[in-house]
């Protein structure tokens, strides 16, 4: 009988062979194998930075939300000093879940089983009947706190990792930060959450959703073709929006920067070099921004980023391993174009199950009326009842079911649409930029980073 | 410790006047509800749209798991599952009737079981508040495990003489994490 080493599965398959660079294929069994899933919990979700929520969800001292890092529940809490902490939601005494509510406010997280109590930062306060020493003397009180994750707040977004000595968050984002800053760090107030996230279960492996978030453009043309059928002019408007520049990194992050001049008639001269930033901004501000925000955005971004925002703004994509990002234009009946801004995480709930978590945002400086309009637009298009994403969530379960078949699991997913063009001319941004029509390269980078992490012992 | 929950119950307005079960108005309303369930289960979206008022407000708030002391906050009306008006409902129905609404093509097989129907008079002549329980079963493809969604629908309907129309619906669902992969169906 074969035993598992760090490089091979128990059937002898080398993990690196699941992803085949020479033909750009991924074995379909990765969407169903329990062994691969268990390894992912250590090597992917135990190693990378994970998105957990937004600081505007817990604005006051003592506020907390219950969230997930991989298949572990965590408490995300703000302490008296205003600092945000992330602690494993497992009592060090007997393993009971300490926090039982989705959200709330408390200075003392007390386990209902034996009464061990913890501060919002996870520190152990004590156990009942102090003189009888329920927690004993073998382990010092300083070591009886909740297990603490390493936290990083980026533009209000809360990230955490179990990789305490690993790469910094900035190293994790790498050169892609230049693009994410154009979305998350472009105004003084930054993003603000509009309510608790929608949550629902999809009977699919988390990677079916995760790899799509690494900027799969092609599926839009078929799975979401109703957009053309309902809102188009009988032509192929969707096809034209597949032109632009896709950016990605060797950490699997990806964003699709769509060409405004190809997407909107009102922006047809945006690339001509004859229009000022103001002129263009007043015709079409960045998605999710209103025209009055120009001065703020200018002071937060470099001239190169401003020019990028007015020609090829990043709109959809993701962050490795399980985040989808949407910052898209939402045309209104009155001719205005507002934005729809959302983040999703795909929480692994087993090899064949994920929880879809959908946060909706607006820039803090947006008027209350526009916020409500943006919220309703986003509910209409994304998440639980969203007309776009309801089709995605009905697709991933079939891929996962295919991967369970004795023959199906031996099939491969193919990423053979390879960009052959030279890098875009006069491109201002860093990272790897792919010019022209959407291709599979950024998704392939996602798999290559998954392969790299999965091949390294935890 | 149940003070907050008790307060929430006590702060409800005095019981409005009920339309007795079995009275002619009640029976007409009940028929309308059975008909609506059949129309939706049979995918007759055009007919369903006819039952919606032009000033419709249709919402499905989120449910949160909160401690008993915060139980009144377990219904969240910010980021909801549905937040619709007549126009957006027409657009949703139009998509479902088109060629490419893959979330419901092939369609789910559904049953909407409507029970515990209570009818109240409102301050507006000819408008009734209709509280009812819903148990929705949904089967897709070869799945043998039914998706089930239970909830209370808090409706307001308008009597147009020969028929009723739906003016307001708020569905209070019982799951904080929905067990089905989307709401491509109407509740």
Image (cartoon, rainbow, N blue to C red):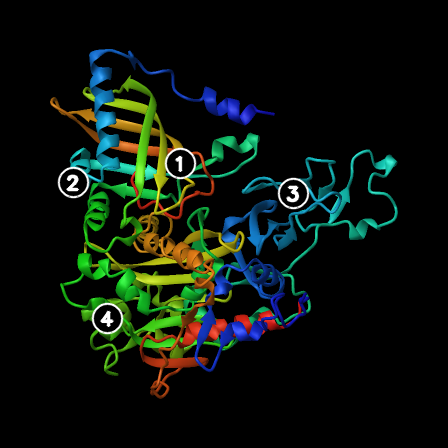
* Residue in view at x 74 percent, y 40 percent: A116
Q: Secondary structure at mark 3?
A: loop
Measured from the top left, where is residue A153 in percent x and y? 56, 61
Helix, strand or loop at mark 1:
strand
Marked residue chain, label 2:
B
Q: Chain of mark 1?
A: B
> Foreground residue, A35 or A234?
A35
- Label 4, residues with CA under 10 Å away: few <14, some 14-19, many ≥20: some
Q: Residues within 10 Å of mark 3 (few under 14, many from 20)?
A: some
The answer as to whether the residues below labels 1 and 4 share one chain is no
Q: Which mark is residue B46?
A: 2
**In contact (CB < 8 Å): disc 3 and disc 2:** no
Label 3 vs label 2: CA separation?
A: 49 Å
Judging by the rendered image, the residue that carries numbered circle 3 is A97
Dot placed on the residue nearer the N-terminal end, 2 or 1: 2
> Above or below — where is A429 with respect to A212?
below
Residue under label 4: A239
Asked if B125 appears above or below A37 in the picture, the reply is above
């Amino acid at each position: 009988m074969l035993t598992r080493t760090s490089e091979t599965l128990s059937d002898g398959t080398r993990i690196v062979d699941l992803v085949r660079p020479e033909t750009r294929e991924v074995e379909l069994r990765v969407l169903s194998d329990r062994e691969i899933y268990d390894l992912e919990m250590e090597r992917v979700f135990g190693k990378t930075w994970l998105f957990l929520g937004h600081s505007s969800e817990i604005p006051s001292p003592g506020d907390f939300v219950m969230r997930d890092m991989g298949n572990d529940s965590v408490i995300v809490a703000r302490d008296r000093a205003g600092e945000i902490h992330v602690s494993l939601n497992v009592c060090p005494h007997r393993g009971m879940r300490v926090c039982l509510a989705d959200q709330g406010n408390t200075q003392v997280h007390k386990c209902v089983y034996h009464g061990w109590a913890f501060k919002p930062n996870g520190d152990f306060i004590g156990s009942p009947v102090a003189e009888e020493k329920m927690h004993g003397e073998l382990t010092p009180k300083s070591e009886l706190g909740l297990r603490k994750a390493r936290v990083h707040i980026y533009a209000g977004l809360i990230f955490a990792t179990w990789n305490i000595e690993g790469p910094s968050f900035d190293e994790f984002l790498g050169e892609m930060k230049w693009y994410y800053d154009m979305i998350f760090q472009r105004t003084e107030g930054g993003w603000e959450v509009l309510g608790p996230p929608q949550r629902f279960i999809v009977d699919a492996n988390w990677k079916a959703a995760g790899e799509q978030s690494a900027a799969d453009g092609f599926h839009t043309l078929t799975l979401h073709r109703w957009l053309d059928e309902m809102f188009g002019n009988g032509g192929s408007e969707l096809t034209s929006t597949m032109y632009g520049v896709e950016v990605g990194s060797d950490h699997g992050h990806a964003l699709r920067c769509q060409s405004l001049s190809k997407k909107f008639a009102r922006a047809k001269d945006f690339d001509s070099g004859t229009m000022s930033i103001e002129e263009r901004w007043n015709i079409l501000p960045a998605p999710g921004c209103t025209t009055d925000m120009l001065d703020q955005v200018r002071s937060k971004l470099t001239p190169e980023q401003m020019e990028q925002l007015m020609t090829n703004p990043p709109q959809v994509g993701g962050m490795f391993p399980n985040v989808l990002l949407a910052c898209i234009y939402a045309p209104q009946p009155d001719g205005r174009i507002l934005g729809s801004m959302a983040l999703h995480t795909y929480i692994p709930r087993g090899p064949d199950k994920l929880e879809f978590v959908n946060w909706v945002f607006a820039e803090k400086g947006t008027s209350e009326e526009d916020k409500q309009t943006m919220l309703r637009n986003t509910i209409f298009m994304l998440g639980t009842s969203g007309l776009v994403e309801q089709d995605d969530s009905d697709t991933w379960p079939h891929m996962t079911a295919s991967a369970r078949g004795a023959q199906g699991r031996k099939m491969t997913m193919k990423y053979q649409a390879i960009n052959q063009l030279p890098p875009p001319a006069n491109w201002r941004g860093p990272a790897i930029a792919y010019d022209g029509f959407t291709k599979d390269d950024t998704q392939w980078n996602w798999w290559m980073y998954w392969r790299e992490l999965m091949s390294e012992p935890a | 410790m149940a003070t907050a929950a008790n307060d929430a119950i006590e702060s409800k307005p005095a019981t409005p006047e009920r339309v007795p079960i079995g009275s002619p108005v009640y029976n007409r309303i009940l028929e309308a509800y059975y008909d609506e369930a059949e129309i939706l289960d049979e995918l007759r979206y055009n007919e369903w749209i006819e039952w919606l008022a032009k000033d419709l407000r249709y919402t499905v708030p989120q449910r949160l798991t909160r401690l008993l002391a915060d139980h009144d906050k377990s219904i969240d009306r910010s980021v909801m599952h549905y937040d619709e008006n007549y126009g957006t409902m027409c657009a949703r129905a139009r998509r479902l009737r088109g060629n490419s609404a893959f979330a419901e093509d092939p369609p789910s097989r559904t049953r909407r079981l409507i029970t515990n129907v209570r009818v109240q008079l409102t301050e507006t002549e000819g408008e009734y508040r209709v509280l009812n329980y819903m148990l929705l079963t949904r089967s897709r493809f070869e799945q043998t495990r039914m998706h089930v969604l239970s909830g209370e629908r808090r409706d307001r309907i308008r009597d147009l003489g020969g028929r009723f129309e739906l003016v307001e619906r708020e569905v209070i669902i019982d799951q904080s994490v929905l067990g089905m992969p989307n709401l491509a169906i109407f509740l």
